[in-house]
């Protein structure tokens, strides 16, 4: 695709998004599905399904909310889920254990993320999902969960079968925490175990393609970190797209910020990325 064609498609997507009302972007999920039970804790997927039925299995995406592994809500990504479901994808916003509610660490967050992707893939037939087209997404600590699910080799839930892969087929990351090393975010939470959980330290062959959105004034995630991650991805031959937004802080992409300008711009680029990798139908199809 030429640069001119790509620009035309992105502008067309932005135009369509600008006509969407806030009520449409603050939807309720179609249903909730329990994907994991740990003790007395029941974790659910908040599912958004396309209105029209399809003969072929659909591509899927699972979003993980941000909140520093301490708190947060799946509703953060309801607008993204509804947007993609309206275009034919199966979309879900996942619950996962957090410190404030469950007294957990980032390690349990990643274990839950792996369980969520593994659940969707293992139940692909009944969910009418293509097991080879499952993307993981998230913002901030949720972006870390998504990236770690795709990269780190361990941290699976104890006793959970690993016969079904938890590795997603694509990553959509919004100001993600992907370096937990001594100079990265969250190092104090993982200490000398950082190499077990840091996506930056686990990039390997077979890593799925990724798109990353980051503001240049993000106080948690340095631009240099994003550029290093992209370079390491490309060294492994993976499609790695980085979009920097001048002067924008952490969380700039969320619906309801800056009159939705950056929500719309990042969603347009997300759509194009997903089209290029076969998750959404191309405009010419």
Image (cartoon, helix red, strand yellow):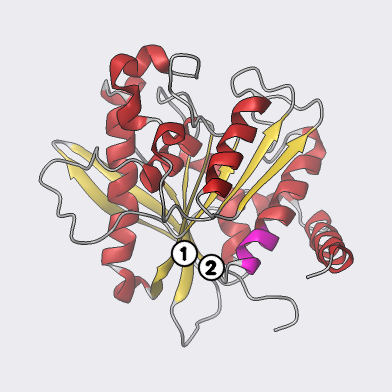
Question: Most prominent secondary structure in the magenta stretch?
Answer: helix
Residue 142 against residue 233 in the figure, above or below: above
Residue at position x 59%, y 19% in the image: 220
Residue 180 against residue 45 in the figure, above or below: above
Residue 48 makes an appearance in the image? no
Residue at position x 19%, y 44% in the image: 37
Q: Quadrant of residue 9?
A: bottom right
Classify residue 196 as left or right of residue 57: left
**Residue 139 at x, y percent in the picture:** 55, 37
Classify residue 120 as left or right of residue 58: left
What residue is shown with label 1?
60
Element on which disc 1 rests: strand
The magenta segment: 271-276
**Residue 189 at x, y percent in the picture:** 36, 16
Element on which disc 2 rests: loop
Residue 89 is tagged as: 2
Q: Is residue 123 magenta?
A: no
Q: Residue furthest bottom?
A: 55
Q: Quadrant of residue 130?
A: bottom left
**Residue 225 at x, y percent in the picture:** 59, 27
Q: Tell me, yes or no, whether the two marked residues, 2 and 1, touch with CB atoms within 8 Å.
A: yes
Q: Is residue 274 magenta?
A: yes
Residue at position x 33%, y 19% in the image: 190
Q: Residue furthest front?
A: 235
Classify residue 109 as left or right of residue 162: right
């Amino acid at each position: 695709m030429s640069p001119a064609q790509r620009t035309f498609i992105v502008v067309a997507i932005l135009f369509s998004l600008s006509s969407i009302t806030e009520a449409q972007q603050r939807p309720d999920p179609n249903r909730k599905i329990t994907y994991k039970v740990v003790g007395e804790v029941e974790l659910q997927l908040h599912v958004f399904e396309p209105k029209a039925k399809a003969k072929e299995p659909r591509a899927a995406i699972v979003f993980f909310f941000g909140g520093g592994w301490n708190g947060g809500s799946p509703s953060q990504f309801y607008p993204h889920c509804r947007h993609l479901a309206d275009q034919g994808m199966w979309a879900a916003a996942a619950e996962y254990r957090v410190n404030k509610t469950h007294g957990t660490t980032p390690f349990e967050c990643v274990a839950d993320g792996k369980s969520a992707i593994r659940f969707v893939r293992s139940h692909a037939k009944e969910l009418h999902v293509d097991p080879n087209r499952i993307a993981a997404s998230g913002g901030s600590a949720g972006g870390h969960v998504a990236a770690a699910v795709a990269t780190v080799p361990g941290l699976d839930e104890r006793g959970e079968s690993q016969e079904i892969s938890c590795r997603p087929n694509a990553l959509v990351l919004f100001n993600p925490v992907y370096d937990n090393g001594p100079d990265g975010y969250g190092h104090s939470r993982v200490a000398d175990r950082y190499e077990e959980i840091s996506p930056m330290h686990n990039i390997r062959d077979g890593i799925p393609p990724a798109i990353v959105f980051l503001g240049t004034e993000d106080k948690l995630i340095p631009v240099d970190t994003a550029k290093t991650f992209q370079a390491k991805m490309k060294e492994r031959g993976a499609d790695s797209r980085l979009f920097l937004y001048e002067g924008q802080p952490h969380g700039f992409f969320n619906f309801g910020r800056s009159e939705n300008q950056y929500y719309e711009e990042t969603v347009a680029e997300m759509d194009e990325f997903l089209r290029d990798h076969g998750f959404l139908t191309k405009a010419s199809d």
